Image: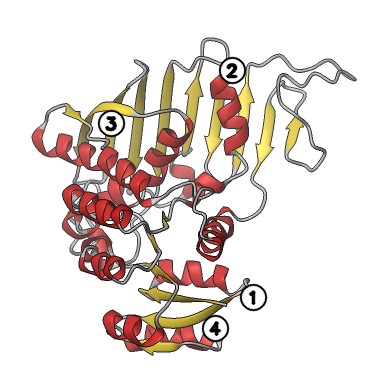
Amino acid sequence: MKKLAIIGCGGIGSYHLSHFLQFNDIELAGFCDLIPERAESFAKQAATGLTFTDYKEMLDTVKPDMVFVCIPPTCHGEVEFEIIKRRIPFFVEKPVALDLDLAKKIRDKAEKAGLITASGFQCRYSNLNAPAQQFIAENEVVFVECARIGGVPGVDWWRKRSTSGGQIVEQTIHQFDIIRYLYGEPESVFTFGARGFITDIPGYDTEDVSVTAVKFKNGALGSISTGCYAKSGAAFDSKITFGTRNARLDLRILDSVDIHGLKPAEEGSSDKGGFVVKGDGGLAKSSGGVISFRQEGDAGVLCDRTFIDAVISGDGSRIKSPYRDAVRSLAFTLACNKSMDTGEMVKIEID
């Protein structure tokens, strides 16, 4: 049985632990956090495993077969290099770093060591991606519009751009990543950011709202807006829209896909406008001509399970977001920060 260890027993670590507790073919062998009580809480939930405050001591003692790295954005670097030196496959939560050169060095060393890697872009494992990819393949998308509006997370390090990267890099990177995954690579960005709307959070110093204009390599354009000023879910309708000349697809990540403008099939016809009905509740056609899909299952569980299976089998081909690809999404978001800071259009360094 393969041994799994976790470095970082905070909120995102708890997210992954909740998945691991559903699996019976791995040993939860080690938990490391600078706050001992956190690691002890994980061991108590797992009813197994040793606890540590020093990750090197954990790696020496436990000798895990895989490591989940669930640490704040500014803490990346030394941890990954130590794991790579020991030739241990690893899963890193996003963003994988706040410095692009550092992320590239980690990428190159991991690949030179031949390690299986993955990153925390669980949205890539959603069942909603298949109809979205089919729609994009069969319809020429001219414009992509995205919005993610929410609030400020309740952790101190998130509130400073120097330690979180800001909302674009730490949160909305999920939207930037899924746009890349479904549609294609960006070429350049120009981003405006605004502050001063959030005045009631001590120590807060990042952008309250930003808007990014994107030029994709295929010539199409996009707009990605994000904000953390909201006090209620009614503040904005967060979604991604892929627009064509005659139809559009609205994706609400890990929730639903609605396709507008495709001619609905005639009653009794086997033609469903290019989409297959499996009879499992995944597709429904309303009287208004909207073809809808709903999220099924937990994409986060599948994301973690895919990495674990890759380590067990030695085959990483089914991992949808290896470390190399996570670096590309990091480059996309860091380019936006650079544009806000310089007031200039920024060309994206994908590789």
Horizontal side of residue 162 vs 300, given as left or right: left
| Disc 1 versus disc 2: nearer the observer | 1
The label number, if any, that marks residue 46 in the structure image: 4
Q: Position of residue 296 (x, y in %)?
A: 67, 49
Query: Do the numbered discs 1 and 4 sit on residues whose CB atoms are within 8 Å?
Result: no
Separation of residues labelled 1 and 2 (CA atoms): 41 Å
Q: Residue lying farthest left?
A: 342
Type of amino acid under label 2: Glu
What residue would you read off at disc 3? 212
The label number, if any, that marks residue 195 in the structure image: none
Separation of residues labelled 1 and 3 (CA atoms): 44 Å
What residue would you read off at disc 2? 138
Identity of the residue drawn at 55% across and 30% down: 250
Separation of residues labelled 4 and 3 (CA atoms): 43 Å
Q: Is label 1 in a helix, a strand or a loop?
A: loop
Q: Is label 3 in a helix, a strand or a loop?
A: strand
Mark 2 / mark 3, whichever is N-terminal: 2
Separation of residues labelled 4 and 2 (CA atoms): 46 Å
